[in-house]
Amino acid sequence: MDSRRLKKVSTLLQETLSEILVREGSNIYGSKCLVTITNVVVTPDLSVARFYFSLFNADDNDAVMVALHKNISKLRGLIGNKTRHQLRKIPDIEFYADDTLEYVFKIDKIFEQINKDRQALENENKKQD
């Protein structure tokens, strides 16, 4: 169970990095894609922050991931500048792709196909009767 402090720190980090990516994103990953921070998990000792992100309108997801990993120290510095009055120590940063949205679209397509198949089967049964 997360403590109140962990929740506050993760929310602060999520808002801060989201703001940084809106302003500096094109300089970091150099494209017109949108990177959204979906979740932040902070370890209990506040030493590591795991950022989960999703990509929209990206030509190459792997290239954006590589660019984010290359710029971890820059991003950590920008986070430190923005949160220097709220946090004593800036946690190390780890990035993880959040593919939940892709999974939802995949499941949605499966359900659509099931409904189409069911409709086709019902239409065939009506014709046979």
Image (spheres, grey):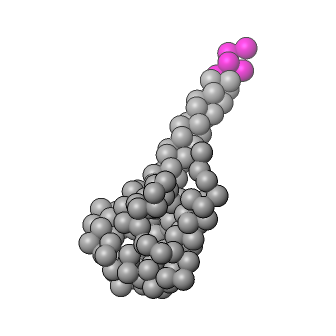
Give the magenta-colored segment's residue range. 124-129
121 sits left or right of 33 in the view: right
Depth check, front residue: 65 or 16: 16
93 sits left or right of 129 in the view: left
Quarter of the picture holding the C terminus: top right
**Is residue 60 among the parts visible in the rendering?**
no
Quarter-of-image position of residue 33: bottom left
Depth check, front residue: 121 or 76: 76
Magenta stretch: helix, strand or loop mostly: helix
Q: Residue furthest top?
A: 129
Quarter-of-image position of residue 59: bottom left
Q: Is residue 61 magenta?
A: no
Q: x and y percent of residue 87 in the render?
A: 51, 75
* Number of marks in the rendered image: 0
What residue is rendered at 38% in x and 75% in y? 76
What residue is rendered at 51% in x and 80% in y? 83
7 sits left or right of 58 in the view: right
Relative to residue 22, is residue 6 depicted above or below? Answer: above
Quarter-of-image position of residue 112: top right
Q: x and y percent of residue 88 in the render?
A: 48, 75
79 sits left or right of 121 in the view: left
**Is residue 76 among the parts visible in the rendering?**
yes
Relative to residue 117, is residue 36 depicted above or below? Answer: below
Relative to residue 57, is residue 31 depicted above or below? Answer: below
What residue is rendered at 68% in x and 24% in y? 122
Q: x and y percent of residue 69 in the render?
A: 30, 67
Q: Is residue 126 magenta?
A: yes
What residue is rendered at 33% in x and 80% in y? 74
